[in-house]
Amino acid sequence: MSEGTMQRRAQRDQRDQRTRRLNRVLVCAAAVPVMLVAGCSSDSGSGEGKDKGAGATVSTSKSPSPTVQAAAFKTLPEPCEVLSEKMLDELVPKAKKGKEGSSDDVSSRASCSWSSLDNNGVKGSQFRWLNVSLLRFESDVTRGSGDKLAKQYYGKQVRSAEGSEGARDVKSEPVAGTGDEATAVRYELKKKEGTFKQQTVVARVENVVVTLDYNGAGLAGDKTPDADDLMKDAKAAAKQAVAAVTKANGSSGSKSSSKSPSKSSSKPSSESSASSKSSKSSESSESSSGAGKSSE
């Protein structure tokens, strides 16, 4: 074989080897995009599944609407009729018709007062003043049940009576058999007309608070009334007022009727709060003015 022939064969072999290497490179290069596309398609599918699952979780995790125990009592009795004529004859014997307090909603807040001046001529006179205040609380999803709100106000009323300005010899005691809870507070008030014996009974029945104020004094030389007798009468009157609240609500006042939940209150919480503040200020002014009426 000539030298030229051998040289040409070697050149063909080299070209063949380069061609085979180039083909292998092209095949590998073509395979890479296919793998990448397959991998991306796989990742995309799994991501969609996760997103769908997350969406399903969010849609089913909504919290339920808040509820609150419904208030037991829905109304209040006529405030000037919560005490019987016999009771009024004993506590305020010379009283005329009761004076009803102002209220923007008598089904939630009401009051009535009576005053009596028994003139004994040269021996002096006996003065008596009586006031009954009723405050009813509605249940509210943000502030709590009517019972809870009434209980809070009950405590405030007791503390208010115990801390009355100018009060001397203050004494407090629980009262049994009057509503769900009751407290009696007694003290003396020195006025220019004489010494006034003040008795306050605060009682709660369900979502209603009853505050009864009763004071007496001997004027123009007449003797000061006995505080124990006044307190006995005040307790009896408070018990009668609580019974009138229960009767006004009929069967709805039973314990069982207060267990059903309510999603919202029938009155805005701001209205209940306003009634509470208004009632408290009204009671304070009436209680202090009751003693002042003795000079009339």
Image (spheres, rainbow, N blue to C red):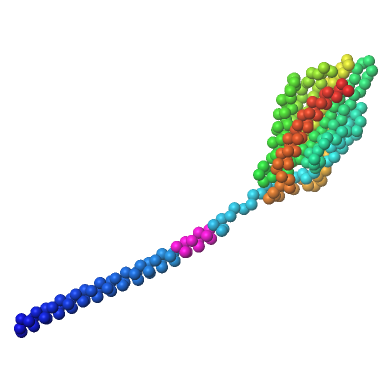
Q: Dividing the image into 4 quarters, which one contains the N terminus?
A: bottom left
Residue 95's spot in the image, x, y percent?
90, 29
Asked if residue 294 shows in the view, the reply is yes
Looking at the figure, which quarter contains the C terminus?
top right
Estimate the x, y position of residue 75 in percent, counting from the top left: 80, 44
Corner quadrant of residue 224: top right
Q: Does the magenta stretch include residue 55?
A: yes
Residue under the point 73% across and 38% down? 274
In the foreground, 157 or 266: 266
Left or right: where does residue 115 sit relative to residue 211? Answer: right
Q: Residue furthest left?
A: 2
Q: Which residue is drawn at 70% across and 43% down?
A: 269
51 to 88, vertically: above or below: below
> Outermost residue, front direction?
4
Does residue 126 show up magenta in the picture? no
- Please state the extent of the stretch shown in magenta in the rendering: 47-57
Instruction: Tell me which corner region of the image, top left, top right, bottom left or bottom right, holds residue 17.
Output: bottom left
Q: Position of 141 compared to 107: left or right?
A: left
Relative to 218, is 201 on the left or the right? Answer: left
Q: Residue at x 88, y 15 (%)?
A: 221
Majority secondary structure of the magenta segment?
Answer: helix
User: How far from the left and from the top, in percent, is residue 271?
Assistant: 73, 41
Question: Residue placed farthest to the bottom in the image?
Answer: 1
How many marks on residues? 0
Along the line of sight, which residue is nearer the eye, 218 or 240? 218
Name the residue located 81 percent from the left edge and 46 percent from the top edge: 250
- Residue 178 visible in the picture: no
Q: In the depicted view, which residue is nearer to us: 111 or 235?
A: 111
